[in-house]
Amino acid sequence: MPKDKEAGMAEDSGVPKEVERLAAQLAQPRAMRRASVSERWMKCSKTACGCGEQAEARHGPYYSVTWAEAGQTRSRLVSAEQAAVVQQQIEADREFRKAIAAYRKASERWADAQLAEIQDQAASTEAAKKGGSKRRWRRRSARKSGGS
Ligand SMILES: [Zn+2]
């Protein structure tokens, strides 16, 4: 394998640096959730309380976490302190999903480079054999497509 030919693409391990970096990022354990948080101001049921008539008199803020589960929207109330943590968890999830997308792209480029390497090898072998291997390959592939 002429690894030195791919000097720009790969390290000694054969894994491109970008793929290695993103894989390490994805492997970082982080608590995450796919959800959203919103602030809620609630009405109570006490008739003496003005919250029923006046929006400013409503109670809160309460923090509501909303997420999708098995095709349903679910939510729960959390404290202000918990809401701050939930924000961080949501951000961690967003970063994780971005890292997955970047990892997929980088590893597809790597996958393409693997094919290009085989093509380059075939081309150089062909050049060395003065086109002999190319003709043989063409004949074989023609037979294959005729049979299927
Ligand atoms: Zn009230």
Image: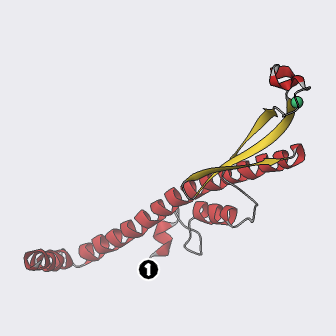
Determine whether, in the image, residue 113 is placed left or right of residue 72: left
The picture places residue 11, in percent across and down from the top left corner, at: 59, 69
Which image quadrant shows ligand 1? top right
| Outermost left residue | 146
- Residue 3 percent across, percent down from the top left: 49, 74
**Mark 1: few/some/many CA within 10 Å (<14, 14-19, 20+):** few
What colour scheme does the image use? Answer: secondary structure
* Quarter that holds the C terminus: bottom left
Relative height, residue 148 to residue 111 (above, below): below
- In depth, the one of 9 and 85 nearer the eye is 85
61 relative to 66 in the view: left or right = right
* Quadrant where the image shows the N terminus: bottom left
Left or right of 50 in this view: 90: left
Q: Secondary structure at mark 1?
A: loop
**Rendering quarter of residue 45:** top right
Q: In the picture shown, does residue 37 fall above or below 28?
A: above
Q: Provide residue 66's location: percent of width, then percent of height.
A: 68, 47
- Residue visible at 34% across and 69% down in the picture: 120
Residue in view at x 54 percent, y 67 percent: 10
Question: Residue 116's image quarter?
Answer: bottom left
Q: Is mark 1 within 8 Å of ligand 1?
A: no
User: From this viewpoint, which residue is outermost toward the front?
Assistant: 47
Q: Position of residue 63 (x, y in %)?
A: 80, 41
- How many numbered discs sit on the rendered protein? 1
Q: Is residue 132 left or right of residue 76?
A: left
Where does label 1 land, which residue? 1
| Image quadrant assignment for residue 33 | bottom right
Q: Residue at (68%, 66%) from the top-left corner?
A: 24
Question: Residue at horizontal 50%, vertical 56%?
Answer: 105
* Amino acid type at image mark 1: Met
